[in-house]
Image (spheres, rainbow, N blue to C red):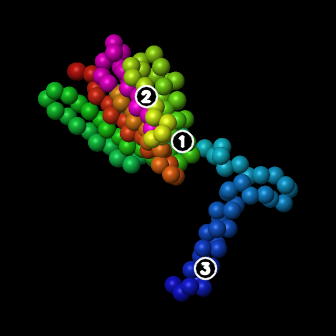
Amino acid sequence: MDEVEAQEVDSALQDDVNQTEGIEVDDKTQIDTTSQACENENDVEVTDLFDADFYIPDCAVLDAVLEHVSKTERKLKTYFRVEKKNWEEIADEYTDLFAENVYEDSKDLQKEQADIKFYLYENEEGNTWVKIIQFDDYAQFYVENTFPDS
């Protein structure tokens, strides 16, 4: 592809982006992209692995799932990234949703990260740890869930 073709492609892509980025249109209204719903394609698949009700923020993209089973424990580790929320919003959501079961909650404003530990299962069994870190363009969160003894 020569330079002229590349510029035409870039221009066409930018036109597509402008149609959805809150640009002003003829009737003087704004297109609001901040409230666009995101589909959590992986929600059902991943939340089923927890064997309990578990929350995944809107617009989260699943990067990895690791399941570890040994003679003594069963763990599930998941990695997500979210582009439409910051680390503090996600941390507050987890703290609010699991408030009664949170036993450790810390935020580091300078490092822009949070650690939340809570019981996901009844009778304070199993442990769930959510670590949220802010990067320039997205927040990443890691969930490590240790299942109760069977």
Residue that sits furthest to the left in the current view: 71
Query: In the rendered image, which quarter contains the C terminus?
Result: top left
Answer with mark 3 or mark 1, whichever residue precedes in sequence: 3
Question: Element type at marker 3?
Answer: helix
Question: Element type at marker 2?
Answer: strand
**Cα distance, mark 3 to mark 2?**
48 Å
The answer to whether marks 3 and 2 mark residues whose Cβ atoms lie closer than 8 Å is no
Q: Is residue 145 left or right of residue 26?
A: left
Q: Amino acid at mark 3?
A: Gln
Rendering coords of residue 108 (x, y %) = 45, 34
Q: Is residue 94 above or below residue 62?
A: above
Few, some or many residues within 10 Å of mark 3 (<14, 14–19, 20+): few
Disc number lying in front (2 or 1): 2
Q: Amino acid at mark 1?
A: Asn
Image disc number at residue 7: 3
Q: Is residue 45 visible?
A: no
Q: Is residue 116 above or below residue 110?
A: above
Rendering coords of residue 69 (x, y %) = 20, 34
Q: Is residue 147 above or below residue 22?
A: above
The residues colored magenta run 113-127
**Cα distance, mark 3 to mark 1?**
33 Å
Image disc number at residue 86: 1
Q: Is residue 28 visible?
A: yes
Q: Is residue 94 above or below residue 13?
A: above
Residue at (48% x, 29% y) in the render: 94
